[in-house]
Each structure stands twice: as C-alpha cells, then as structure tokens.
Amino acid sequence: MDILNIWNEFEKEINQHAYIKSFQWEKKAGIPFIYVTSYETKQKIEETIRKASSRVMRGKRLHSETIYVRESQDMYVYRHRFYVPQEKMFCCGNLCVDCIRLRS
C-alpha cells in the first residue's frame, strides 16, 4: 500500500464537492497539511474531510487524524495524516497481556 496513492484518492474525493473551491496538501517539516478553500462552514468542511478519509481508508488497515490549525477568510488549514495503527503483529515471547496469540 503506497501512502501517496491514498493521498491522491483523498484529493479526488475532496474535489468532487461543488462547494470546495480549492484543495491542496503538502508536507512541511515532515508533517502533512491540507489547505481547503470553500464557501461552506468549518463544520461542513470537517465533515467532508472525515467522510472522504473513511472512503479512502475502506478495506485498508489505516487510521486518519485531522487537527484544525487556522483559518484565513475562506481558507482553512488542517494537519491531516493517514497512519497505520501501532499494534503488535507477532509474538515476542515475553508473555505480554496483549499477545497476538491470545486474540480469537
């Protein structure tokens, strides 16, 4: 699974909405930021981001996190990332409580 493909699909999902004037994402200091210019309210934009993220992640072992950063007139800036959940994938032999062998 290539994360760049996920980002490209996410961008397509966001741009499908008529009320989104522009959408851009870029990494700064290794942290991905998204810039959304829209006619709609902040709540509507966040709902759109959440739904687009869930559509893109469907069937994959991914999670997303979106954190509001700032706004300027009709442009909203969010820190948004897709990440793989950190959980044990193998038994280390230390008899851990959350051992992969104890899953049903």
Image: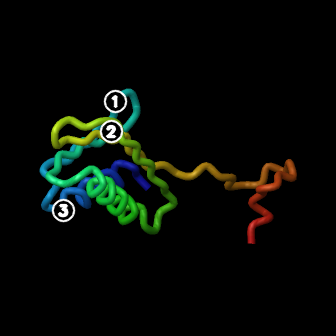
- Name the residue type under label 2: Phe
Nearest the eye: 34 or 67? 67
What residue is disc 1 on? 28
Nearest the eye: 86 or 79? 79
Per the image, label 1 sits on a secondary structure element best described as: strand
State how far apart marks 1 and 2 are (Cα): 7 Å
Which quadrant: the C terminus? bottom right
Nearest the eye: 48 or 23? 48
Q: Residue 20 carries which label?
A: none
Q: How crowded is mark 3: few (under 14 residues within 10 Å), some or many (20 or more)?
A: few
Which quadrant: the N terminus? bottom left
State how far apart marks 2 and 3 are (Cα): 19 Å
Q: Are marks 1 and 3 in contact (CB under 8 Å)?
A: no
State how far apart marks 1 and 3 are (Cα): 25 Å
Q: Is residue 72 left or right of residue 43?
A: left
What residue is disc 3 on? 16
